[in-house]
Image (cartoon, grey):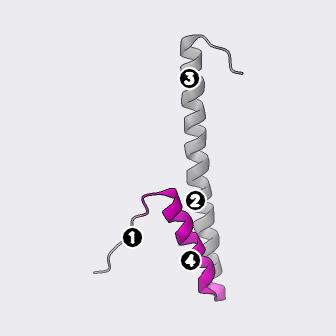
């Protein structure tokens, strides 16, 4: 059974994407693009969630969005 790699930090994820760039070969381009798109989606989702929580907290306290 193959051991699965679990990425537990952003620097580790970036290192994995960089390693994909070093591999070469046309078929690997699809994996690089997919990896970058997945990472982008995760980061954008986390940013949206954090902004939403911040704005909800400001509204709860009656503060205006600056």
20 is within the stretch colored magenta: yes
Task: Pick whichever of labels 4 and 3 is earlier in the sequence.
Answer: 4
Residue in the foreground of this view, choosing between 46 and 11: 11
Distance Cα–Cα, label 3 vs label 1:
36 Å
Residue 20 on image: x %, y % = 58, 77
User: Label 1, on which residue?
Assistant: 5
Q: Residues within 10 Å of mark 2 (few under 14, many from 20)?
A: some
User: Label 3, on which residue?
Assistant: 56
Q: Residues within 10 Å of mark 3 (few under 14, many from 20)?
A: few
Residue in the foreground of this view, choosing between 28 and 12: 12
The residue at the point 62 percent across, 65 percent down is 36
User: Which circle marks residue 39 in the picture?
Assistant: 2
User: Label 4, on which residue?
Assistant: 19
Task: Pick whichever of labels 3 and 2 is earlier in the sequence.
Answer: 2
Task: Pick whichever of labels 4 and 1 is earlier in the sequence.
Answer: 1
Distance Cα–Cα, label 3 vs label 2:
26 Å
SS category of the residue bearing label 1: loop
14 is within the stretch colored magenta: yes
Please indicate whether residue 65 sits to the left or right of residue 1 in the image: right
Task: Pick whichever of labels 2 and 4 is earlier in the sequence.
Answer: 4
């Amino acid at each position: 059974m193959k051991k699965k790699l679990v990425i537990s930090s952003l620097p580790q994820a970036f290192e994995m994407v960089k390693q994909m760039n070093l591999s070469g070969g046309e078929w690997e381009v699809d994996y690089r693009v997919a990896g970058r798109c997945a990472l982008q989606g995760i980061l954008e989702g986390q940013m949206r969630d954090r902004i939403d929580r911040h704005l909800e907290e400001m509204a709860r306290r009656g503060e205006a969005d600056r």
